[in-house]
Amino acid sequence: MVLKNYYKILDLETSHVSIDEIRQAYRQAAKKYHPDLNVGDNLAEERIKDINEAYKVLSVPSSKRKYDRIWNSKFGKGPKAFEKSQKGAIFNIFLGNLEENKKEDKPKKNPIKGENIETEINVSIFDAFYGLDKQIALKDIEGNAKTYTVKIPKGIRNGEKVRLIGQGKNGQNGGKNGDLLIKVNIENDKKFKLEGYDIYTDLLLTPWEAALGTRTTVKTIDDETKIYVPEGIQTGEKLRIPNKGYFASKEKRGDLIAEVKVVVPKHLSKEEKNIYQKLSEISKFNPRV
């Protein structure tokens, strides 16, 4: 491949010129070596070909940039590189007599994004509800421990993944690194259990509260609320408190489900025993019938 110094062909001293300057230089060079003014001059014919070729490449910004990259890759950048060791060669290039074989470009490899790394962490239902920054330690490919700060957003859903961009395996051929995907598992505690967007809790009642009905306070995950317990409620029945559960969206929450558990006192006073004894004598209730 013939590598010609198109800037010298157009009598330009630098590659840092505008398209208008290239156009003006072309007009002057084309006029100087026009065939009508150089009849029978074979050298002028060769030069006008080079001038047209140089203008065709340099007058288009995209092809000019490509040409500059090729030139700079061979001779470097800057004025010195533009002139260095080229003065003797420029004339020959100008005449079209210097044949310089360009090394074949190595085939460009497509950039490949690095693989994602997946792991999972456990957080309490309270931490998931309120959100937090949690630090986790993982080993990299070389076995070295690395600490990451994971921002658990408020109201994250069970099984949802947090993505740390660029923290996965390294990319290849200039490709981006993969990501670190962290699956969040929400752990229930003794008081609250998450099912979908609803939160379940136990409502402990005395036998007389269950039998007579009552108004009582139930603790929610972020507050407490008053509820009415109807008389005759049984163990295992559920009372639903709307909009006191987990986040279903920014504006809406699931429900709090209070499951009734009637609790009998383990230790009775003498008076309590007498009352229960009297109740057993006068009551005709038999749950086994």
Image (spheres, rainbow, N blue to C red):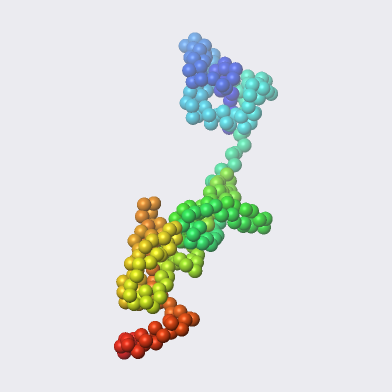
Q: Is residue 215 left or right of residue 108?
A: left
Residue 142 appears in view: no
**Quarter of the view holding residue 196:** bottom left
Q: Nearer the viewer, residue 188 or 160?
A: 188
Q: Residue lying at the far top in this picture: please name it.
A: 37
Using the image, determine if residue 171 lies above or below residue 209.
above
Q: Nearer the viewer, residue 175 or 177?
A: 177
Residue 67 appears in view: yes
Q: Is residue 11 left or right of residue 271?
A: right
Using the image, determine if residue 4 lies above or below residue 168.
above
Q: Residue lying at the far right in this picture: please name it.
A: 85
Where does residue 281 sit, x and y in percent of width and height?
A: 35, 89
At a point 48% along the width and 58% down the height, the residue shown is 128
Q: Is residue 137 left or right of residue 244?
A: right
Where does residue 230 sit, x and y in percent of width and height?
A: 31, 71
Instruction: Work out which quarter of the rendered image holds the C terminus and state it.
Output: bottom left
At a point 67% along the width and 22% down the height, the residue shown is 80
**Quarter of the view holding residue 243:** bottom left
